[in-house]
Image (cartoon, grey):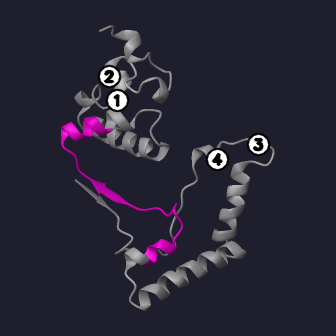
Amino acid sequence: MKNQQSQRYVSMDNFKYTIPETILNNSKPITLKDNYDNVLEYYSNSYSLYRDMMNLLKIAYQALLNVGISKEDARLILPEGTYTEGVYGFTLEVLINLCNKRLCSRAWWEIRELTQKIADQVIEVLPELEPYLVPNCKKLGYCPGGKKNTCGKKPLREEVIHD
């Protein structure tokens, strides 16, 4: 069971946004982060054109709502990286499966980070679950992803298990 904050029913005024680690940690002479920050500064600084653009997006979003456009359709004008909130509930089996798959270093960083936070909170209350709320490779002792989908931290299944 999950409840994801709905942009259909929630006002997205003054929304937050995400900067991926791949951009934050880039160290090219003119970093991707600088370029990203410049774009975000343009949108978020109240004295910049970017802020004006964000204000225009907010005005356009509200205008769409005012003429009867549903929030689910009006939200399409908002940037992809707009923050949202969610409430999630899991059976133990689903939680273990989620952690086994989404704590893998090859999972998308944002999902991996969220999954780790969930696992940490569960382990705080039920420490006996810690051995189960791990990536598959840690649980199995080998990478189940295969040659094309491995991070290289663990040997492949065929290197460990000889049928």
Q: State the CA–CA distance, disc 4 to disc 1.
A: 26 Å
Tell me, yes or no, whether the two marked residues, 1 and 3, touch with CB atoms within 8 Å. no
Mark 2 or mark 1, earlier in chain: 1
| Disc 3 + disc 2, Cβ < 8 Å | no
Q: Which residue is mark 3?
A: 28
The residue tagged with tag 3: helix, strand or loop?
loop
Q: Tag 2 or tag 4, which sits nearer the N-term?
A: 4
> Is residue 85 rendered magenta in the image?
yes
Of badges 4 and 2, nearer the viewer stands 2
Q: Residue at x 65, y 42 (%)?
A: 25
**Residue under numbered circle 4:** 24
Write down the quadrant of residue 138 in the picture.
Answer: top left
Residue segment shown in magenta? 74-98
Q: Decide: few, some or many residues near mark 1? Use Cα within 10 Å; few <14, some 14-19, many ≥20.
A: many
Is residue 42 covered in magenta?
no
* Residue 139 in the image, given as x and y percentages of width and height: 32, 22
- Judged left or right of residue 137, residue 128 is left
Q: Badge 4: few (under 14), some or many (20 or more) residues near its Cα, within 10 Å?
A: some
Labelled disc at residue 139: 2
First in residue order: circle 4 vs circle 1? 4
